[in-house]
């Protein structure tokens, strides 16, 4: 049995346990693409599903299967650690910070997002509660930066993502049309990217150019970066659909 099938089996077991006992059952941090499997497991077991990653818009999240009462944010086995360093002497990026955590031998499913803080020289690390103490004791550097760690004492203040807000008009809200407009490609070029398996919607590969899009959808295109569908603004005088997109540059 492969790793993915073992993960699906584990999700089904958690969903069934929650449905039968009425107690909330939590996964560890999931790859975003596994959230679809969580929904399938919940539907099959007759359980309900909630997801939380420690802050709004987190990419790596913990799934909670439940039957009677949804768990609150504080019930999730997630801990937020504040990382600080002297920004005059070092500027570790996400890769440096994640590499430092992985270098401690911590399993990937014990680590959620690492998000840069609003203040210079700060970041927030979201971990499973059973590795919190180990991280606090052992994570002391990332690249050339010396780190100071502590439990976050308040809600994290995260740096706004870097990017540009675009307003485009399309003939329809199909994936290929929006992708072409957002990336300034021809419709045919966008379609070829999709058919080549280079495009993901909400972290899952999508091969249909005619797939409809919804507000909040995250589109990832290998070699081009990411953009999010921020909103739809109605029909223009020329009968086209106006769409707001946020294209990430950081």
Image (spheres, rainbow, N blue to C red):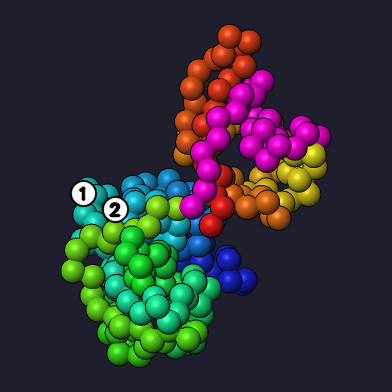
Task: Name the quadrant containing residue 22.
Answer: bottom left
Residue 106, compared with residue 238, is above or below; it is below
Residue 193 lies in the magenta-colored region: no
The N terminus lies in which quarter of the figure? bottom right
Residue 208, compared with residue 54, is above or below; it is above
Q: Inspect this view and state whether residue 175 appears.
A: no
**Residue 69, numbered label:** 1
Label 2 packing within 10 angstroms: few (<14), some (14-19), many (20+):
many
Residue under the point 19% across and 63% down: 154
**Residue 199, numbered label:** none
Q: What distance separates the C-alpha of mark 2 from that of mark 1?
A: 7 Å
Answer yes or no: do the residues labelled 2 and 1 have beta carbons within 8 Å? yes
Residue under the point 68% across and 51% down: 224
**Residue 66, numbered label:** 2
Q: Nearer the viewer, residue 31 or 155?
A: 155
Callout 1 secondary element? loop
Q: Relative to residue 237, is residue 179 drawn left or right?
A: right
**Percent position of residue 84, x then y:** 32, 76
**Percent position of residue 185, x then y:** 75, 37
Label 1 packing within 10 angstroms: few (<14), some (14-19), many (20+):
few
Magenta segment range? 162-188
Q: Relative to residue 164, is residue 137 drawn left or right?
A: left
Q: Nearer the viewer, residue 68 or 117?
A: 117
Callout 2 secondary element? strand
Q: Nearer the viewer, residue 98 or 166?
A: 166
**Percent position of residue 51, x then y:** 36, 53
**Percent position of residue 186, x then y:** 78, 34
Residue 187 lies in the magenta-colored region: yes
Q: Inspect this view and state whether residue 194 appears.
A: yes
């Amino acid at each position: 049995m492969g790793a993915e099938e073992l993960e699906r089996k584990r999700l089904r077991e958690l969903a069934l346990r929650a449905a039968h006992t009425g107690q909330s059952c939590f996964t560890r941090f999931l790859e975003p693409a596994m959230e679809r499997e969580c929904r399938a497991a919940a539907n099959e077991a007759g359980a309900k599903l909630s997801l939380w990653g420690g802050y709004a818009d987190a990419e790596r999240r913990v799934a909670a299967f439940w039957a009677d009462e949804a768990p609150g944010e504080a019930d999730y086995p997630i801990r937020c650690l504040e990382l600080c360093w002297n920004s005059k002497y070092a500027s570790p990026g996400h890769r440096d910070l994640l590499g430092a955590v992985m270098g401690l031998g911590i399993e990937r499913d014990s680590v959620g997002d690492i998000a840069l803080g609003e203040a210079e020289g700060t970041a927030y690390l979201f971990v499973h509660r059973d590795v919190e103490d180990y991280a606090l004791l052992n994570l002391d550097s990332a690249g050339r930066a010396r780190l100071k760690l502590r439990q976050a004492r308040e809600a994290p203040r995260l740096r706004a993502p870097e990017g540009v807000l675009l307003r485009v008009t399309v003939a329809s809200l199909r994936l290929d049309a929006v992708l072409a407009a957002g990336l300034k490609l021809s419709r045919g070029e966008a379609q070829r990217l999709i058919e080549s398996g280079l495009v993901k919607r909400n972290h899952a590969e999508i091969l249909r150019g005619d797939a409809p899009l919804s507000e909040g959808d995250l589109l990832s295109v290998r070699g081009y970066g990411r953009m999010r569908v921020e909103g739809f603004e109605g029909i223009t005088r020329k009968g086209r659909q106006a769409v707001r997109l946020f294209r990430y540059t950081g």
